[in-house]
Image (cartoon, rainbow, N blue to C red):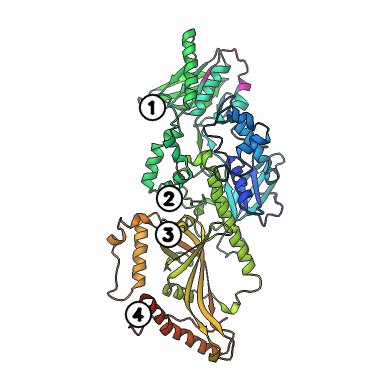
Amino acid sequence: MTSVLPGEDDSDLDFIGIGFGPSNLALAVAAEELIPNWRGLFLERSQSFQWHPGMMLEGARMQISFLKDLATLRNPASRYTFLQYAKARGRLEQFVNINEFRPTRLEYNDYLKWVAESFADRVRYGAVVTAVVPLRDSPSPADRFARLRVYVRDESTGVETCFSSPNVVYGGGGVPRLLGARNTSAVVHSSAFLPNFPNRFNEPDKAYRFAVVGNGQSAAEIAEYLLSHYRRATTHLFISDHTLRATDHSPFINEHFFSVKAAEFYDYPPAKRAALRNELRLTNYGVVDADVLQKLYQIAYLDEVRGCRRLFLHGESRLSRVEEIDGRVVARFEDRFSGESHEFDFDGAVLATGYDRVLDAEIFREVLPHVLRDESGEISLSRSCRVNTGPALTAGLFLQGYGEASFGIGDTLLSLLPFRAQAIAQEIAASRHRDAVTVRQRPVGDYPPKRYLETDPDRLRAVIERYRFATLISARATDEPVVTQLPLTLDTSRGSHGVLFGHMDLANPHAELLDGRPVLALFHGPNGYIPPHQSNQLPTWNSITVEVRGRARILRDKDAVVDGLRGIAAAADPSPGGFRLTREAASDERLFPFLVGFEIDIDEMVGRFKLSQDRDDRDRWLAARTLAHGLEQDDRDLVASIVELPLDRDHDPIPLRRARTSGT
């Protein structure tokens, strides 16, 4: 890229949001309420806040309750709720008086704009993102990309700038599905309908011939609009199904748009996910609200009474080609069953054919090689919508509205925005806290003293392999650590530093914080009190501890979990004739549905070996002997008293590989 200017100081941006539609607007609200003194920058290509401007049809209503706004279901006391908006606009009593749970699309759009005004200083409008590139951050290891750099072009001036952050949240929305057609003034996608179509066809009494392509809500609403605004025109509605179908709004079906259902869907095996997505399609795709269908049918019936048919429904039809030729629109359709083709001639055509939700291959060209995918080829996401990546990319990339394969049919809907925004905000808050702790503790004051730090990988692995029962720590938010004690086994053959395997009860709240998120594991080696009579020094406590930092990921491959469980048993009793967990036992269906297996890709290992390194050789020897004596006698007596059984073995079957006591 040429003439790229650096943005203003972005060194402490918590995140960069790409796109500023409802998804990232909900994130701004969540960040305001959950992250103290947050710093975020949103980049939006439109010149002002826009939400489906092509479909702001007069009288069209939302398909959700006003309570499913950007905040209410997450925080009813939020200042950004729809009711707060109605109060601020001076219409709260009137809104209550109309006794309507579903506001008009026009009013809901005004609500979104009202919220967006509160964050105007954090948004750059007219900013076209051209690339997102992994960036090495100076404190990070040479082979790790800890930040993402976002290149932006100002649409009005053409000047390019760039910003960087440890987190990028992509909420770019869907790309209109044009089925090979080109947008012209006479052939438009539904997303561009109102700003373009009425201007091209500006004679309401002319006998136009219109085509509308699509099965769903937008197609039906546009057909109704054309029939209502062009009294002498004919409208041909082409659908791939046999006929139009109504949306299922039953309360039992709508429960599938609860946040807890999205969490449950995430845990389902791939086959069940695919089956449920197909089974629930009638709640969201290719269906129309019953009241809109009723209006369409009434219009068609009154036309029959008048003897002038204006609506023609073409079922089982698939568009194969559409183009504008010499001011006319030529469209070819195929019969879905017979394969026969039919060509039609129209004045204008509207493609209400939905959207594709894929990451732009050019914008994310340098990021995509790091992205992990699931068994079906979909992008693998954590519970907080963070993209699971290879170990080299440690920066966070979050996707809003691209996780239907992971979270179910409601992922693209407004209903779940508050909860998804909360999960993302909490993850960003946790990483911000972790980074701040790193900055405070490591460079400043040299604590712990360098003489206690151990980086020899062989010694660190020796402690990890001998003292496998570890303390695992995750952060749900800046002030809420979650801790679990559990065994972790090390596989040194994988990754640059190795991979840890562990498992825990599925009911453990910690399990929700593992997939794609950073963790800290502490391995506690021998420790003991060093009394002053051993040497000429004050009493102290010596210890061997290894800290392991990395990113966890849930294992969805049952065989991998089984192998991990068998590995724990084998490592715990490696002696000849020791117990070996069979594959059949490890796969026991009475146990397997209630546990979750995971791996941790190790990013960093550091030891804190406090072994009197500040003393002379004789004192270090005395301290080491005391520590060893504690292992051989005191610890054994303690375990014997707890289990109330005599421990009659003289020697541990797995001799401790003691670390060298001399420090650096």
Dots 4, 2 in contact, CB < 8 A? no
Foreground disc of the pair 3, 2:
3
Residue hosting label 4: 653
Q: Quadrant of residue 123?
A: top right
Q: Earlier in the sequence, mark 3 or mark 2?
A: 2
Spatial CA distance of label 3 from label 4 is 29 Å
Q: Earlier in the sequence, mark 3 or mark 4?
A: 3
Picture coordinates of residue 508 (x, y %)? 44, 58
Mark 2 residue crowding within 10 angstroms, few (<14) / some (14–19) / many (20+): some
In the foreground, 391 or 22: 22
Mark 1 residue crowding within 10 angstroms, few (<14) / some (14–19) / many (20+): some
For badge 1, the amino acid type reads Arg
Picture coordinates of residue 62 (x, y %)? 54, 31
Residue 204 painted magenta: yes
* Rendered position, 333 above or below 81: above
Which quarter of the image is occupied by the C terminus? bottom right
| Residue 508 in sight | yes
Q: Is residue 397 left or right of residue 251?
A: right
Residue hosting label 3: 598
Foreground disc of the pair 1, 3:
3
* Rendered position, 365 above or below 295: below
For badge 4, the amino acid type reads Pro
Residue hosting label 1: 336
Residue hosting label 2: 374
Q: Which residues are magenta?
A: 198-210
